[in-house]
Amino acid sequence: MSARSLYFHDFEHVLRRYREMCEIHPGLPESEIHEEVLYVPASRDGQDGPPVWTGRAPRGKYRGALFDRDGQRIEAADITRRDWRARNEATPEPEQGRIGGTGIYLGWLFSHYGHALLESLSRCWAVGDVDFAVYHAPAKRIPGFLEAHLDRLDIPTIILPSRPTRFERLIVPRQAFELDICAYRGFVDFLQTRMPKKDEPAPPVYLSRSRLPADRRGVIGEEVLEGFLSGYRVVHPETLSVQEQVELFGTHTAFAGALGSAMHGVLFSRRPEITYLSVRTPISNEFEYLNYLMCDDLVEADSLYVACCDLGDMPQRGHSTPLRLDLSAAAEGLKVSVDPTLQKRVDARHREAWAEFRLKQGIAAGDRSAVDDVRRHYPGTMTPQLSTLVQRLEQGDDGQHSGGTRGSRGPSSLRRRSRLLRYLPGRSSG
């Protein structure tokens, strides 16, 4: 791996922290075989309902684990993030059903694309001649994009138990990618099974986030930059199928884009050149870069981190606060020319996006102080849209009737029932 930076303060400190904290191992990790395994499903803070998680750690304590026939927690099945294991309060519970045969435990199923790719697939390397696969699934469903990856990797029928369940025999592989800790080179070899060949030279690919909502850590100004990317193929990953994304990374050798889950697709490439439009400190910290650097290392990338995203003159209000793009800095990293006079337009649009984000944040939380926050930081006259949001918040609109929720299912969350055997309480097999 060759990792460099542009406009990135203390990047050498980030690299030192990476070398101190993270390891890249050859091959693949070990797996264990257990009999009479008790599966305790996912829940949080003593609640029976499933926790709403995407990829980040849930607040407070949570439950969900495997226990061996002696009632001891199977450590190999735990999520191996630095702070998760200590907060898992799972204990053995009376079984409410039994499933026979040999299965494989594949860990936790996340709906966040990046975490699904790095974690939910990180045990699939051990799948062989088994009857079924088992996940801990807080949302009790398989996202469409993850199902497509599972299909591509020939993963068998999946069981998502909703009650404490005894399994006759389970294979428990360890994770081949542990966030912020380590990864195994064999994980990339596994992911790249049946990859397309690079037949002819292809143009560099720019992975754009410009069509995503601003409240998903949008980078304001990206759409302006794209107008100057002569020689690049501009791609919006969310418009591509999983197979198309895999083929994209498999047939190109140079990629660029803002930090985000789509950039983890480099795991389907070999020795690529990667330009990351990264976040200037102190908005970000070195821990955010560890997993990107591990991905770079796994595929032997030549990577450049260009610190060109920031908050402008607006304060941070959570991890998803919209970012502002420094056009000149980004252009230098991408080796293109831009019109620097357009930066004022980008800055104005960023302030508007920040105000919209903050007001919607206030509506979702019922926090009317968001209005004062916007009036204090947003200069000039508010747009009609912002005025409407202010009015909704001042009138006590909690957002419950705003046309759908973030958890609503769309076509991407549908699954073929032949892929999923949902375990029903009281039913047994084998």
Image: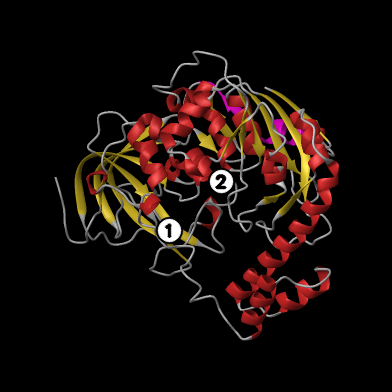
- Residue 81's label in the rendered image is 2
Q: Which quarter of the rendering shows the N terminus?
A: top right
Q: Indicate the position of residue 223 as horizontal and vertical percent values.
A: 67, 45
Front-most of 366 and 70? 366
Tell me the residue that label 1 is attached to: 90
Crowd tier of the residue under label 1, counting other residues whose Cα lies within 10 Å: few below 14, some 14–19, many 20 or above: many
Image coloring type = secondary structure
Amino acid beneath label 2: Arg
Residue found at the far bottom of this picture: 395
Res. 172 in view: no
**Residue at image coords 56%, 79%:** 398
Q: Which amino acid, by three-letter code, is at mark 1?
A: Ala
Q: Residues within 10 Å of mark 2 (few under 14, many from 20)?
A: few
Q: Is residue 105 left or right of residue 178?
A: left
Query: Could you tell me which residue is drawn at 69 percent across and 39 percent down?
Result: 227
Q: Which residues are magenta?
A: 14-26
The circle on residue 357 is none
Q: Quadrant of residue 161?
A: bottom left
